[in-house]
Image (cartoon, grey):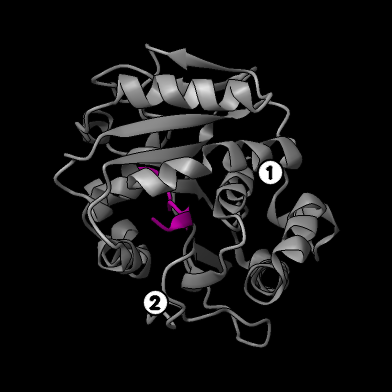
Amino acid sequence: MPVYYLCHGGGPWPFMEGEFREHMRWLEASLKDLPRQLPKRPTAIVVVSSHWEAHKFSVTSSPAPGMVYDFFGFAPEMYKVQYPAPGSPELARRMVQMMTQAGCAALADGTQGFDHSTYSLLKPIFPDAEVPVVQLSLQQNLDPGEHFHVGQALAPLRNEGVLIIGSGMSCHEHGPHMAIPSSRFDAWLRRSLLEASPAERHEALLHWEKAPHARKVHPREDHLIPLMVAAGAAGSDSATCVYGERLLGSMAVSSYRFGGTREHSPFDRGAPASRPAIHTEKAAVSP
């Protein structure tokens, strides 16, 4: 089973209608295409959340996780949306065991629900919400190496048909001023993932702060760190860009698949620094 690092967009966008969802139409098309890329329907899905941090790596272990409405500024009905995917207590237990055996402190959390890193991402991919889902937290120190190591520990799940997804945003700062910084960071990310050897890729990700405009694009790295888990789980598999555009008119963003075919994705528009940004009105966003 391939591994992914995917942009999850802003707030509860897949449950909305109108202009804000229209901004996400290219992202939505890329996510809807994902099942076609898989060798089979997953036995379960592990989503690495950029919106859940804990003192130890934590996994949702409820058989029926609830919903966490971790966004602001949206209509009241958005705080009632549901993505009723079942959990998997057994998979959660195994994940804790695998991480612990690899030297990573981990625990199962039976009360934590799905946040929008999970349900806003999975709604377009598996709208039936029938595949069991386990959400994995970040470790609150956000150390790239530790998260890469956790990905390595969980990699054997791929051979059991488990789909591992790092859910974040390759750029987590928006506005017209971000056109050039995000494009230059995106160009670095593409080179690091698409052109580098696995060893070079590992080194680049561990030292991501050296990338152009790194701290402008990620003032805090919570939305980039899920990539480290995905890259760790990927092993030596090569990467393919499966989505790229200027989101909201200025943010150069991209998503990646590790493993599978290396065919060019029709949803990768790219966002070179030479391409002018299209300015749009600022929307209420909590990516």
Q: Is residue 286 visible?
A: no
Residue 121, horizontal then vertical, whole percent = 35, 48
Asked if residue 92 is positioned above or below residue 281 in the image, the reply reads: above
- Left or right, 78 with respect to 219, comes to left
Residue in view at x 76 percent, y 61 percent = 199
Indicate yes or no whether the magenta region holds residue 260.
Answer: no
Please give the label number shown on residue 267.
Answer: 2
- Left or right, 144 with respect to 43, comes to right
Amino acid identity at mark 2: Phe
Residue hosting label 1: 221
Indicate yes or no whether the magenta region holds residue 7.
Answer: yes
> Are there few (<14), some (14-19), or many (20+) residues within 10 Å of tag 1?
many
Segment tinted magenta in the rendering: 1-12
Local secondary structure at mark 1: helix
Quadrant hosting residue 152: top right
Quadrant hosting residue 55: top right
